Image (cartoon, rainbow, N blue to C red):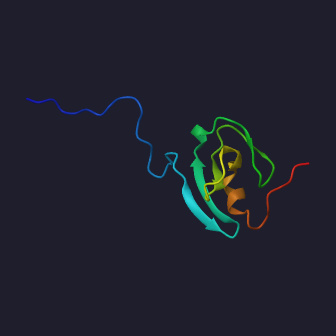
Amino acid sequence: MPRRNRPKRGKAAPPPGVSLGWGSHESAEDGDWIVRSIPGDRATKMYRCPGCDHEIRPGTPHVVTWPADGTGGVADRRHWHRACWNARHRRGPTRRL
C-alpha cells in the first residue's frame, strides 16, 4: 500500500489575510504608493512614524510605504502607524527640528 503524503513539519501556513511581504498599490491625492503591512511578529526594529513623530516599537503592527513610480530606493521607505497612514490627507507628515 502506498504511503500518504504528510504535511511538512515546521512552519505553518500563515492565517488568511496576513501579508506575505507583497505590497498593495494605493492611489491618493499625494500620489501612487506601494503599501506593505507588517504584522507585529515581523516588526523587530524601532522606527519613528512620520505622521505622528512617535516611535513604532518592536512588535507593533504597522505599514511600510514607498512611492510607486519606481524611482526611489530603500531610502524612500517610511514606516507608519496604520492609523497615521490612513489619516495623512488630514494632517501632513511632521517635521523634526
Question: Is residue 23 shown left or right of residue 59?
Answer: left
Whether residue 77 is situated above or below residue 5 in the rendered picture: below
Residue 48 image offset from top left, x and y in percent:
76, 45
Residue 71: which quarter of the image? bottom right
Image quadrant holding the N terminus, namely top left
Q: Residue furthest front?
A: 71
Residue ID at (56%, 60%): 25
Q: Tag count in the figure?
A: 0
| Residue nearer the viewer, 69 or 53 | 69
Indicate left or right for 17 with 76 as reference: left
Q: Residue at x 58, y 44 (%)?
A: 39
Image point (11%, 30%), residue name: 2
Q: Residue 26: x and y, percent?
A: 59, 63
Q: Position of residue 8 (x, y in %)?
A: 32, 31
**Residue at the extreme bottom of the image, as rendered:** 29
| Residue nearest the viewer, comparing 46 with 30 | 30
Direction left: furthest residue? 1
